[in-house]
Image (cartoon, rainbow, N blue to C red):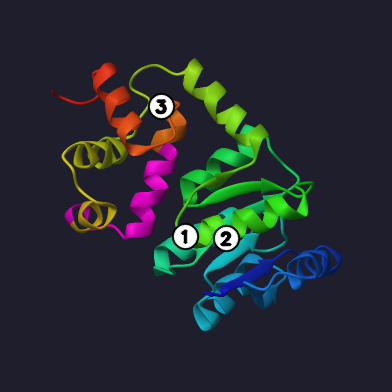
């Protein structure tokens, strides 16, 4: 059985203790470190190479979004799942755009949290239902030029049959960054998989036939 190595980042010790307690009964998840702010999270992630990082957003000093951006800048491969009490657009979108692999709320049931940690470790995207609803709402309000130039490049390569690894090599991006772009594409186009994203891209005229 593969063990998921987890780093817990939150400025409140009682919250960290609660998360560690929830994870303790799981045989396949191991907490390898705890951090109280973004800067410490970056330092520990580089030293401990966890598979998944549970990251709070609002912390003194370096906040969660700044830490996620630093992970990307330094090429830290850990998958970051935001765990916060905030689900407003002003909180969700910067975190997703910075490279978060998922976004959960602190009132999530224990089983949902454990499933999300395991899913993130496999490369899957995880979103709280309220967050997914907000992102879908933004898609419905957007026009057909919703994708960024980089997202259009990723979508075009996916349409051409490229894997995430090949797309990353073509665009000089890490595979995890390509996955993050795909998560954003899915959210913006209102789809859940690669094939549907390509079909929707053609339907909206974002891709040339």
182 lies above or below 172: above
Question: Secondary structure under badge 1?
Answer: loop
Q: Which residue corresponds to mark 3? A: 189
Q: Is residue 170 left or right of residue 26?
A: left
Query: Quick one: 48 or 118, which is closer to the camera?
Result: 118
Vertical relation: 15 (above or below) 134: below
Q: Are marks 3 and 1 in contact (CB under 8 Å)?
A: no
Q: In this image, 104 relative to 155: left or right? A: right
Residue 192 in view, yes or no: yes
Classify mark 2: helix, strand or loop.
Answer: helix
Report, in whole angstroms, how far the alpha carbon at label 2 lies from the one at label 3: 26 Å
Q: Which region shows up in magenta?
A: 170-184
The mark lying in front, picked from 3 and 1, is 1
Disc 3 on helix, strand or loop? helix
Q: Label 1 near label 2: C-beta < 8 Å?
A: yes
Who's the residue at 15% across and 24% down the image? 208
Residue topped by disc 1: 122
Where's the C terminus, which quadrant? Answer: top left
């Amino acid at each position: 059985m593969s063990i998921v190595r987890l780093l817990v980042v939150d400025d409140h010790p009682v919250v960290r203790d609660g998360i560690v307690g929830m994870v303790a009964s799981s045989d396949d998840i191991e907490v390898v470190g705890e951090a109280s702010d973004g800067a410490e999270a970056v330092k520990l992630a580089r030293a401990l190479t966890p598979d998944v990082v549970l990251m709070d957003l609002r912390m003194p000093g370096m906040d969660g979004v700044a830490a996620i951006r630093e992970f990307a800048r330094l090429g830290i491969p850990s998958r970051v799942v935001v765990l916060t009490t905030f689900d407003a657009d002003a909180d969700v979108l910067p975190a997703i755009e910075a490279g978060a692999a998922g976004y959960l709320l602190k009132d999530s049931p224990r089983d949902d949290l454990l499933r999300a940690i395991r899913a993130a470790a496999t490369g899957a995207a995880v979103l709280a239902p309220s967050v997914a609803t907000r992102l879908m709402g933004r898609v419905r309000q957007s026009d057909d030029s919703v994708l960024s130039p980089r997202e259009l490049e990723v979508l075009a390569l996916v349409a051409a049959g490229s894997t995430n690894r090949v797309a990353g090599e073509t665009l000089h991006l890490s595979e995890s960054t390509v996955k993050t772009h795909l998560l954003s594409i899915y959210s913006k186009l209102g789809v859940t998989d690669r094939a549907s994203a390509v079909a929707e891209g053609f339907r909206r005229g974002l891709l040339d036939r």
